[in-house]
Amino acid sequence: MPLQTVTVSSRGTDRIFAGHPWIYRSDVSVSPGVEPGSVVSALDRRKRFLGQALYSSKSQIALRFLTREKRPVDREFLAERIQAAEAYRRRVVQDSDACRLVASEGDLLPSLIIDRYGEYFVVQTLSQGTEKLKPIITDILQERFSPRGIVERNDVAVRALEGLEQTKGILAGDVPKEVVVTINGLRFAFDLLEGQKTGGFLDQRENQRAAQNYAFGRTLDCFTYAGGFALNISHQCQSVLAIDSSQDALGHARRNAELNDISNIEWKEANCFDFLKAADQAGERFDVVVLDPPAFARQRSNLDSALRGYKELNLRGMKILNPGGYLITCSCSYHVTEADFLEAIASASVDAHRTVTVVERRTQGRDHPILLTVPETLYLKCLILRVL
């Protein structure tokens, strides 16, 4: 049957031609009877075909474009997109059997996330459209990968914008409490049903590997969570002090250290801001400091306070570094641009009376693709700095 159609304004049409897949509700006219979550044919005001998109009846993002082509958006279409995403990961993911297999817009499957943890998959369907396609997506994963289990982690607040409930559970197979995978040649345990995000944070994998090139001596890892940076750099260091305010996170980190027979990491429960201030007052010094905090700006209205927080955090990190040491500092706040982040750090260096050189400017791992015309797909900034 022919697809239901929606009409896109001239402003929305310009947005499509500029390469962005989102069209906002104010730029879409919808005929009565268009079903929430359906695939629709988008036309401009002259009734010219623009493409096919997922339609949402609730979100301010009314359309998420899937293709500019006239072809069925069916099981074959979805399987092709997932297969293309898998082929790309085989090229860019090394020494790891955990990665983001499908990164929504980055893999031309907007509002769909699929993370792979070895023989297990975790799915997030973040719009009415992908929620409706979830049974087909689950079948494709089973047919192509024969996984031991598939989990849905749709316990995320953004689904409320789509009028969807938060839910989590097992979609297929069986999933143990602990799933052990390899990342950068190291073993990590994840709880896919209760862990952060889809079980853990996979976007820092390449930055953690890069950090190995600079780690030495005595290292401090702040906001360590499950120990990703600490474990990756431990073999290059004399000792690592890893800090987090969450006792549960430190329990996971210790478990990961045991899995890899790593014994030169001290795990400490503390507020990282308070610890850095106390360490400076006590005259403690480190050769490397890693700062990987949670997002400080989840909304644009938080930007000013976030930049103050990043300045303070990096100021304190610089003050306890030995001359010639390295500061590895990150921001996962989308609303904080790299230019904003660099400006905050530059201001911190002036106040700390330290000279700083930029060694590497990095982003999220390549399994989290960045679309050039979709700035929302670039969120993670990681700077490796030499502090003199």
Image: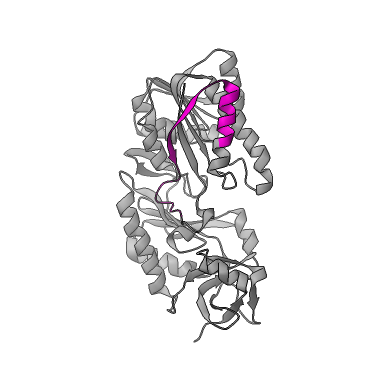
Does 259 appear above or below 363? above
- In percent of width and height, residue 2 lies at 50, 86
Q: On the rendered structure, is 169 left or right of 36? A: left
- In percent of width and height, residue 172 lies at 43, 61
Question: Which residue sits at x=36%, y=56%?
Answer: 148
Does 151 appear above or below 308? below
Does 207 appear above or below 387? below
Question: What range is drawn magenta here?
Answer: 343-370
Q: Is residue 140 magenta?
A: no
Question: Which residue sits at x=47%, y=19%?
Answer: 286
Could you say which is closer to the camera, residue 255 or residue 132? 132
Question: Which residue sits at x=56%, y=82%?
Answer: 4
- Quarter assignment of residue 358: top left
- Please identify the residue farthest to the top as the structure is shown: 283
Residue 124 visible at all: yes
Across the whole image, how many numbered discs are drawn on residues? 0
Residue 294 visible at all: no
- In percent of width and height, residue 50 lies at 51, 76
Could you say which is closer to the camera, residue 132 or residue 278? 278
Q: Is residue 349 magenta?
A: yes
Q: On the rendered structure, is 72 left or right of 159? A: left
Colour scheme employed for the rendering of this structure: one colour
Does 134 appear above or below 221? below
- In percent of width and height, residue 120 lies at 39, 53
